[in-house]
Image: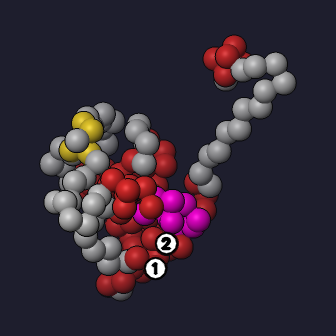
Amino acid sequence: MLECHRVLRSEGVVRVAVPDLEQIVRTYLQALEKACIGDAKWQVNYDWILLELIDQMARNYSGGMMQVYLQKDTIPNLDFVKFRTGSEFKDILSELQLTQSASAPKKTKYLLLNISLSQFITSLEVLNIAVIPS
């Protein structure tokens, strides 16, 4: 915040937006409970909410892993993801459509290391995964 104060113009405003982690964790626990009893729909939703939770706490580039997830050809829980991302969903999809032409081969915005989310979580290590713009 000191740096914000230093560079802020006189009468300027700093807006800080933070995710509602309590709400994300509550949804995570609900998804975990339902996934553990074998609900296939919630097993897929669990994957998203776990990704969202980690991404919101430890994102180190714009869009994060949530944006990478949205670049998949098929999103099995599209309604849940739309609900979770709210009005930002349209903006994210519009941005992705601008970067991907229907006639050109699909290009992802990031080149990712081959690491599974479960390996990342269970290792209990903080990793900086390099992303390289394509």
Q: Is residue 86 above or below residue 60?
A: below
User: Which residue is located at x 37 percent, y 61 percent?
Assistant: 97
Asked whether 115 or 118 is in front, the reply is 115
Q: Secondary structure at mark 2?
A: helix
In the image, is residue 104 above or below residue 113? below
Q: Nearer the viewer, residue 9 or 5?
A: 9
Image coordinates of residue 1 in percent, x first then y, are: 67, 23
Q: Residues within 10 Å of mark 1 (few under 14, many from 20)?
A: few
Instruction: Identify the mark at residue 79; answer none if there is no mark.
Output: 1
Give the main secondary structure, helix, strand or loop, of the magenta stretch: helix
Kindly report the distance in space between the C-alpha atoms of the residues bearing marks 1 and 2.
5 Å
Q: Say which residue label 2 marks.
A: 82
Residues in magenta? Answer: 84-93
Residue 6 in percent (x, y) is at 69, 14
Q: Does the magenta portion include 14? A: no
Relative to 126, residue 104 above or below: below
Which of the 4 quarters of the picture holds residue 34? Answer: bottom left
Q: Is residue 121 visible?
A: yes
- 29 with respect to 101 (left or right): right
Name the kind of residue labelled 1 in the image: Asp
Residue 15 at x, y percent in the picture: 71, 38
Residue at 43% in and 42% down:
62
- Identify the image quadrant of the C terminus: top left
Number of numbered callouts drawn: 2
Q: Is residue 69 visible?
A: no
Q: Residue furthest right?
A: 11
- Residue 9 x, y percent position in the rendering: 76, 19
Taking the image as shown, residue 84 lies to the left or right of residue 23, namely: left
Q: Are marks 1 and 2 in contact (CB under 8 Å)?
A: yes
**Residue 70's image quarter?**
bottom left
Determine whether the residue tagged by mark 1 lies in a helix, strand or loop: helix
Q: Residue at x 45, y 61 (%)?
A: 94
